[in-house]
Image (cartoon, rainbow, N blue to C red):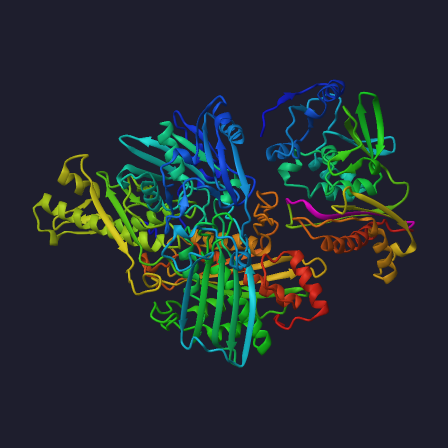
Amino acid sequence: MQSFDYARPSSLADASELLVRRGDDAAALAGGTDLIVQMEKGARAPALVVDLKRVADLGDGIERRDGALRIGALACLEDVARDARVREGFPALAEAAGVIGSVQIRNRATLAGNICNASPAADTAPPLLVYGAQVNLFGPRGRRSVPIEEFFLGPGRTALEAGELTESVDLPLPNGPTGSAFCRLARRRGMDLASVNVACRLSAAGELRLAFGAAGPTPILVQDEGEVFLKDEATDALGARLEQMAEATRPISDVRAGEDYRRAMLRVLSRRALNTARRRLPESE
Amino acid sequence: MPEHVGQSVKKSGGRERVTGALQFAADMQMPGLLHAKLVTLDCARARILSIHAAAAEQVEGVHCVLTPADLPRPMPRYGPVEDDRPVLADGETKYYGDPVAVVAAETEQIAAAAAERVRVQHEELPGVYTVEDALAPGAPLVQEPSLRPDSPHRDSNVYNEWHYAWGEAEADEADLVIEETYRFPMQVHFAIEPHVFAAAPDEPDGVVIWSTVQHPFPLRRAVAESLGLPAAKVRVVATEMGGAFGGKGYPKFEPLMAFLALRTGRPVRLALSLAESFLAGRRAAGVVTMRSGFSRDGRFVFNRSRADYLIGAYADITSSIVSKAAYIGCGAYRIPNLEVTARAVFSHTPPATAYRGFGAPQYLWALEAQIDRAARRLGIERLQMRLRNIPDRGEELIPGDTPVDGDWKQGLSLAAEAVGWHEPLPPGHGRGLAIGVKSPRPGAASQALARLHHDGSATLMVGTTEMGQGSKTAFSQIAARALGIPFEKIKVVCGDTGRVPFDAVTASSRSTVCMGNAILAACEEIKRKTAALAADAHGVSADRVSVSDGMVHLPETVLNYAEAICSSYGPGEGEVMGLGEFRLPRDPEHPLGGPAPFWEIIFFATEVDVDRETGQYRLTKLVTVADIGKAINPAAVKGQDEGGSLMSVGQAMMEQFILDERGRPVNLGALDYRIPTTQDIPLRTESLLVENADGPGPFGAKGVGESGATAVAPAIASAVAQATGASFTELPLTAERVWRRLKQQERAPDTSAPD
């Protein structure tokens, strides 16, 4: 690992200013579970590492706020996975956060870091997509909020502008009853990057949101609506609709999986996630 | 006196290992220590045009950049069997990671930064990275013919070829004949402790080496010969290792470190990263084409096979790996007519070396699968099929070699019973069986020095090394029993050629038997000498004195050891030494140099639960039954079987070291070379032991350690085949591979998987 300067600003403004001033030479660090590995491999060699852990106005809490559940930028994945409100209202996110890395990594890695790293395989991205999360940013020009589906631009690329930092992630509370689930496939059962992952949210009205990871340059969100999704039957019609939804994916072949296997598994996982989501729909009167 | 042998005494040093207190080679503090970094190229095979070290030498803190120009000409070469490995790449790199120079600096960081500033002008050359490429007509030669002018294979990429046959080798007809080709990938050892090599000048005119090495004596020879020093001037200290698995057996960068230490006059250490360890040694890939003939009632009629092992650019120990695997081409079965032709094939890939199981897993992957296929075709149940072919105790296994030395049918039946072989299968489940068999290194010697001190405590000095396998503990138990003193009063000094007598290797599951017997002999000598001392001191004839249970029995009195020794040497003085030796017979007529002292055999039974849609499967049960004669320390023996078989679970399910079309690793490091975690291991494991005290080692022991890693993959594949109706020829058996096979099968049903 190349040597680097290290700064530990105490305010968002200072952190942002440092990042603006040093531009591409600087890298922001929260849990560091992606950054340090990339630096160790030589994939990134920032001259300055800006540690955000002591930024006073960045929170690590999870709280109800204006019709949403707000997850602070420094909240670690283990806290997200264990939080009762996340598990209750956003189980796909709890499931995804709970399978990333090991316990040690989850106690260090943050949800905000997982999306800012913008890996196409990021496990928390598909759940955030199906839940319609908003990413709250702080930057040199003040604060703004970006819908998660506009956040990912490509592998390692996000909507963050120079000097912008993720301050929190909002999960809007659903208007009516929904069920949701997360599924993934990896080369081994834990501590691995997803070969593919899928999140699903189904509303009682039959609105289906599916999001796919490791299935293209960015995580992909697709939506559809229909009675067919509410029936617990593996009909051809259902298969065709799911197939249609997966058409937006562009999986590749790499060391983790072949393109055709990924494609087939996206179908299998979509169906499984949908089945689980449907089971989780609250019983209607 | 407590009985030690047969008890699960706690492993010596175990606490230190798990608490981080153990000093590994990378932890050693040495005044003036310099840190080394290898200079390598980003390609496999390349012609080196020039090396410019000036920029690196100017980096502050750099003490030396050693290039081939600083080494004697011709380039010193070494190896356990052939002296074919150059200290630095000699005009041409042969594989990705082959060092062209080395930097020594004040810190690891400085050395790494300087290594990047060594400018190596080179021209990438076409290489061969698979068996097929290496054997293709006109393939580039890996080794210059001038390196082996006397070899009939010098103009090809075949390092050597071995041929074994018995019965009617030409036999080719039977009721059922099955021919198939099986593939086994390159795999890396993945010891949690990467390799560390250190060297320092040793006065006068010598050198001392500290290395994560299993076999310090062969290393001493390699260093001495490379540097032109007498063996007495080279001291090799084998540090306690955090896993080795064969990967730390033979010389690697120690001669290079010795040159560097002598040049700088300072101690120098090269500590590899895990990724660099992948390039320092790996398992030979295997391609085995097997043609098997069976009678209608499921008995082997003949078996003919060609086994090609893909090795690196240097021979290393592969002659033993390939010849030993081919020699026992019958596995654990009675095969009346057999022919095996095996080759070790050079390639431009990282060095192939010993790997737990030696060459057996690659070959047994094919043999066990053939039996399953035949069983299915003949409509014979797989356990019955195997039982019909297993020889009885005392029966010849390989003509002219040691007869079957255990109740192998009993062992296999026990494994089947433990996995619930005859119980109904839950949906989606399958069960499998396989047998692993091999033998320890023949013709080798172990010597042990035992010292009984003035106070009745003892030190054992042995060439065996400790890598976590627990030899120190077993040796203490053996000596405690032999001398009749408490286990706690014994210290074992391991693997330092400057202090301990000769031992061939710590490998092939030989230490408990061979070094154990040497220790017994040393203890007997101590008892004889102590009796004689006491007799002399008390003025009685020696034949009236006996030693038992740690006491010296004289006609008038009984003394403990301390009293006996002091009665001769005076209070607090003297000690009694015993030198024991155990040698396996050497037979120049024998294809391997000598017969097997015992057969190391293990029986595997597995159960899996397969998800047909994804190809994923979970191991629900893994049973091992090892026929080990006598367990000196049952917990340690079971630990070896569990460790070996779990290691093999990874090899069966996910491990493969992949190179790209230019011979560069695709998955260099832990991120993409996957090994199992606790979530991948079987839901239930059971390690059973058969103890009939029928081995040649102390108290009837046979060896243990390797067998657990011999034939897990075929047992797993057999179970997946039963669950899915598809059979497999290539490892690892990833979920994706299972899925592909099932898709293929939808189009063309497989008739060779068990029902």
Looking at this view, is B156 or A219 the one in front? B156
Image position of A25 (left or right of B90): right
* Image position, residue B489 (x, y; %): 30, 41
Characterize the magenta stretch by its predominant secondary structure. strand
The answer to if A195 sits in the magenta stretch is yes
Asked if residue B604 can be seen in this view, the reply is no
Is the residue A259 above or below the residue A131 in the image?
A: below
Is the residue A174 above or below the residue B686 in the image?
A: above
Is the residue B641 above or below the residue A40 in the image?
A: below
State the image quarter where residue A84 is shown. Answer: top right
The answer to if B745 sits in the magenta stretch is no
Image position of B16 (left or right of A99): left
**On-image quarter of the N terminus of chain A:** top right
* Image position, residue B158 (x, y; %): 45, 58
Image position of A238 (left or right of B696): right
Number of marks: 0
* Image position, residue B257 (x, y; %): 40, 35
* Image position, residue B716 (x, y; %): 57, 61
Looking at this view, is B369 or B619 the one in front? B369
Asked if residue B159 can be seen in this view, the reply is yes
Residue at the limit of the structure toward the left, as seen here: B539
Image position of A12 (left or right of B639): right
Identify the residue at image location x=44%, y=52%: B354
Q: Which residues are magenta?
A: A191-206
